[in-house]
Structures are given as structure tokens and as C-alpha cells.
Amino acid sequence: MTDSRVLYLIACAAPPAQRIRTGIEKAQAAGWDVCLVLTPSAARWLDEELPELAELTGHPVRTAYKLPQQADVFPPPDALLVAPATFNTINKWAHGIADTLALGLVTEAIGLQLPVVALPYLNQAQAGHPALGRSVDFLRANGVTVLLGGGGFTPHIPKQGDVDAYPWDVALGALP
């Protein structure tokens, strides 16, 4: 996919990560060359699927920072999509914490002024925590499109989320 725009799809450990293939295939159908980055916890969830996901994207799946002497295995991104974005990742991101490759990429994307879309997956209890609103406001004020609430992801009752209703198309439609 050499003529495609490059999308870094960054997935956190939330139930829609188990359907990451859906997100990849929809992004590819929209013309994106998808490079998949998983948080360490999401990588544990998808461990057995990693070879298939690498074959599907045509790129290695990245989960950790490379060593300084290693070459980058991804082309530079045209946009980033964080989906699913967890409570933990949203709050760390807003506070500039880059203790994983996924967080390093998204914190840096703000400074590089790259287009970034975040599609959370949260329950109502997490969404009710006061830190979340502050973090979402901060990210939005700094150019991140956070699809939470009307027109995006609506938090569900704890333990009653519908993974198959996760709005991948909404996230992809918000990309440039």
C-alpha cells in the first residue's frame, strides 16, 4: 500500500481490542496503510493473533519502544487513531506520561501537530470520575478529536458494554 496514507492505529486493553481486525479492515477499506501499536496489556490479550495482525497490516505489530540502534519499522504517520482508548490511557496522555510506546506516540503527536482521533471505551463509573473530564478537555484543547458523548462513544453501565456496537466507522470518519 505504498500510495496510501499511513494511519497508526493504537489500541488499548479494552474489550473492542478483541475486534481490532474490524478496525484494521475498515481503515484499509478507507484507503489507509495501517500500522498497529498495542499497549502492553492489549498485546497480552492479542498475543496469539499478533502474527495474523502483522500479516493483515503488512507491518510488524509494535508494543514497545525500539532500541536506539534499531531502525524504525513503520513509515511516518499521516494520522493516529487511538481506539479503543481507555480511562487510564486518556488520563496519562493528558498528563504527558509516556511510559509505553503507545503513550509516547500520542503525546508526541500533539507536539508534532499530527491529526489524532481518540475513540474511548468506558463505563459510566469511569466516565463519572472527575479526572476524565479534565483530561478530555485538555486533549481537545490541544487538537485531539476525542469522540466521547454525542456523536461518539457513549459510556455503558459497568459490565454491560456491547463490543460489537463499538463505532469504528465514526472514528474513521473523523480522520482527515
Image (cartoon, rainbow, N blue to C red):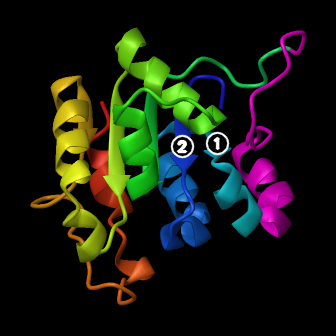
Q: Which residues are magenta?
A: 46-70
Q: Secondary structure at mark 2?
A: strand
Residue 62, position in %: x, y? 74, 39
Looking at the rendered image, the quarter that the C terminus falls into is top left
Dividing the picture into quadrants, the one containing residue 130 is: bottom left
Per the image, the residue denoted by label 2 is 9
Looking at the rendered image, the quarter that the N terminus falls into is top right
Residue 33, position in %: x, y? 59, 35
Q: Is residue 49 visible?
A: yes
Instruction: Examine the structure image and report whether residue 125 is included in the region drawn in magenta.
Output: no
Disc 1 residue type? Val
Which badge, 1 or 2, is on the more N-terminal residue? 2
Q: Secondary structure at mark 1?
A: strand
Foreground pick, 21 / 83 = 83
Q: Is residue 30 visible?
A: no
Q: Is residue 52 above or below residue 104?
A: below
Q: Is residue 2 above or below residue 153?
A: above
- At 34% from the left and 67% from the top, the residue drawn is 122
Instruction: Examine the structure image and report whether residue 61 is included in the region drawn in magenta.
Output: yes
Per the image, the residue denoted by label 1 is 37
